[in-house]
Image (cartoon, rainbow, N blue to C red):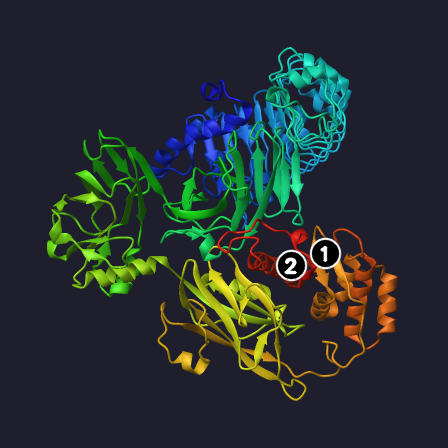
Amino acid sequence: MAAVLEGLEPEETAAAAEDAARSAVEAVESRPGAPFLLVGNQLNLDVHPGGCHRLQYLCSQQPPELLQVEFLRLSTHEDPRLLDDTLAQVPWSLLHLRSLVLKGGQSRGALGACLRGTLTTLPAGLSDLACCLAHLDLSFNRLETLPPCILELRSLDALLLSHNRLSELPEVLGALPALTFLSVRHNCLEKLPATLGSLSALQRLDLSENLLDTIPSEIGNLSNLSELNLASNRLQNLPASLAGLRSLRLLVLHSNLLTSVPTGLAHLPLITRLDLRDNQLRDLPAELLDAPFVRVQGNPLGEASPAPPSPPDISQIPEMPRLFLTSDLDSFLVTPHGCSVTLACGVRLQFPAGATTTPITIHYRLWLPEPHLVSLGPHDFLLSGVLELQPHGVAFQQDVSLWLLFVPPRVQRCREVVVRTRSDDSWTDLETHLEEEAPKRLWARCQVPHFSWFLVVLRPVSNTCLLPPEGALLCSSGHPGVKVTFPSGATEEPRQVSMQVVHMAGLELRNLLEESEASVSPLLCLSQSGPPSFLQPVTVQLPLPPGVTGFSLDRSHLHLLYRTPSIATWDDITTQVALELTHLYARFQVTHFSWYWLWYTTKTCVGGLARKAWERLRLHRVNLIALQRRRDPEQVLLQCLPRNKVDATLCRLMDRYRGPEPSDTVEMFEGEKFFAAFERGIDVDADRPDCVDGRICFVFYSHLKNVKEVYITTALDREAQAVRGQVSFYRGSLPVEVPQEAEAARQRKGTDALWMATLPIKLPRLRGPQGSGQGTDFSLMPLNLGDAETGFLTQSNLLSVASRLGPDWPTVALHLGMPYRELQRIRHEFRDDLDGQIRHMLFSWAERQAGQPGAVGHLVQALEQSDRQDVAEEVRAILELGRHKYQDSIRRTGLAPEDSPLPGTSASQIPESAQV
């Protein structure tokens, strides 16, 4: 055990011993009658459940090997009483124990977070190990106070207490003379004991991610301390005694509230890294600013300093400004200093110092993923909206780092996430790295040399290589056995070749063909740059379909299929190539690249079957729903859901919505366009950018939310009776006339059928005064709510908003800042008139906002805080519609070409005459 632990950091000790034991565990358990995981001097009981029972069994049997154990690892995801009883037997059973790991976190919750163990204390008997125990790991548990027995472990060298609930450390902590490593990361510490400075042997101290606002000056007595981590606390200042830590090599202070640091830190003789990022530092000693080991990004340093001369001396710029932009802004300024920018739409950018030689204004906009803005292959999935960064094509002196936030998809076999960008009317994939922020939030990071459109795509794993004239071998990283061999002389000039492999489930194929013996190889997609053909034949190797071997198959049932991407048919080329069969593989030669598929079936019309199977790979089974809000039946939620998510979504929505059962299952392709049409006397109430001739347009993307909330109305008399209408869903391009449901229902259902589903919609009979204000005496002076930054809403727009609020208006009013007394006055003045209450509240607030900046943004925020995201989206749609109308008017007047996209125009650029 000593050899295993020697030379390792204390945090790595447990992992190293576990790795050393893991290889022997399987051999031990495979022996007949082996009841426990005991290998040499290592006892690892956290690999499988029931570790406490196994340890109790060992203690009762007392095998000779137990006396040699120096390392014990036990999971704390056990019953607390059982765990306590088990630990009480450790001191008298494991007499030579040097390392004890009682760590939680092995299990994960529904959202992927590590679950804490059940450990809340330790039995007092563990103090009997005082002479031998050197390593104690209690991380990821529920400790609120430090167990007293720990303070008696005089030989303790490393103590790990991270991810617990400790609010303080005891004063007697200084009674551990041998302690060299102490980790209390991610707890609730608000203060530290002064006796911490008595740990004279301490070399590493981690107190990050706590609630500390001060550090005792006695910390300067830790003469052997080499690493100190105080990141992510609430420190506003530091004791001057830190400058006396002459052995300090690493000092981490990022993410605090520091406004200054001791000047003596610049003179520490051994310091190699001083991390001061993300604080409130406005000034630093010159010695620290010039030191190469100091990191100060994210501080407001030198804000009042004059700009450096042009051209700038980049080596003299110590800081990188950080910008956090709200949704009201659509541009920001980048200087030669560089900057780090976080956008409200889930995008981060980092411009390194010197990326641009002159200040430049960057415009951004997040577009809805319309088909003309998205480039997807047949087996690609879209994971994000489309980000546009302008000006297009401007080359930076250094690559700019770009992070795009997306929700990770379900585990997909042999697929990868890439950022795709448009350049010179073509789309290319960038080298992408994934960074996890939370279990269900990932960042896709890439480096970009210039700006254009960007989106995140899930694609089959692509293996590429640069083919030289000397030849090469290209192998698939996800499917062993798929290879392409390029002989010498296959090309005169180097060219880029790439390979993608797509797998099809055998059960799905057999159900499609209704043949129990049918099987197919992986689908191979080959592409290249340069000339279409090779100068020498290229050898392709595909694995034989599952269940088929080269020595037993019937060659008349084996088919090699070929498809050109520009043609939707598959051709059987088995007789046109020489198929070389081995026990596991089939090899053949080609002179140009396309798609290849190896089938084993008794069917004869294989080409047509392959087309259906290929489409099945791309199809998604979905259901369509139409729900009406319980408190406001005129508000309709339309959504297209994957079949496996329907029940969970309806369970979540049914407390606020009601409606018919979901439609029958419909098959749709990624990126397919469809639309919802309201029929039989019901129409869409508002003018929306996505509404054409009363029909709401959708584009289906399997990994994005395909949901919209609309308001409907009717020209029929609802005072006499309820209006029973319907919403029908149709696929394809928008036709001139939507067929009636009765006619559409007779059409054949399928992926090429126009009609998909029809669901009933009912508007109940109206009772009492109307909410629309008809028949009431209501008039106000015309107004334009807003400003040039956030855009304007007219009186008509505010009336539309007022008609949506209903009983939620008091909550919205309070979030708008109106006093509760005024709400009571409005209720009294407009008794029994809900619509009058809403309109008076909204317009009286709007009149007080005259000339105030950010009014529209304030209204949207109040709606969101009141759980009226639907009305907030309606306001955004109004502004978006105004932007579209403004752009159309610009093109009509000839100020911009018809086919050129206008810059990301904000509401501030829309004149009042173009507003809705």
The mark tally for this picture is 2
In front: label 1 or label 2: 2
- Residues marked 1 and 2 touching at CB (< 8 Å): yes
Q: Position of residue 905 (x, y in %)?
A: 61, 51
Helix or strand or loop: what does disc 2 sit on? helix
Q: Position of residue 202 (x, y in %)?
A: 64, 18
Query: Could you tell me the amino acid type at mark 1?
Result: Val
Judge left or right: residue 25 versus residue 203: left
Quarter-of-image position of residue 172:
top right
Identify whether 721 is placed above or below 157.
Answer: below
Residue linked to disc 1: 856
Bin the neighbour count of mark 1 within 10 Å (Cα to Cα): few under 14, some 14-19, many 20 and up. Answer: many
* Residue 157 in sight: no
Q: Residue furthest top?
A: 269
Judge left or right: residue 776 versus residue 37: right
Query: Could you tell me the amino acid type at mark 2?
Result: Leu
Which one is in front, 524 or 80?
524
What's the residue at 67%, 35% (across, down)? 187
Which one is in front, 67 or 44?
44
Task: Give the CA separation, mark 1 to mark 2.
Answer: 10 Å
Identify whether 270 is placed above or below 875.
Answer: above
Which one is in front, 887 or 361?
887
Quarter-of-image position of residue 511:
bottom left
Judge left or right: residue 835 versus residue 153: right
Residue linked to disc 2: 879
Which one is in front, 223 or 411?
411
Task: Report the disc number at residue 824.
Answer: none
* Residue 757 in sight: yes
Helix or strand or loop: what does disc 1 sit on? helix
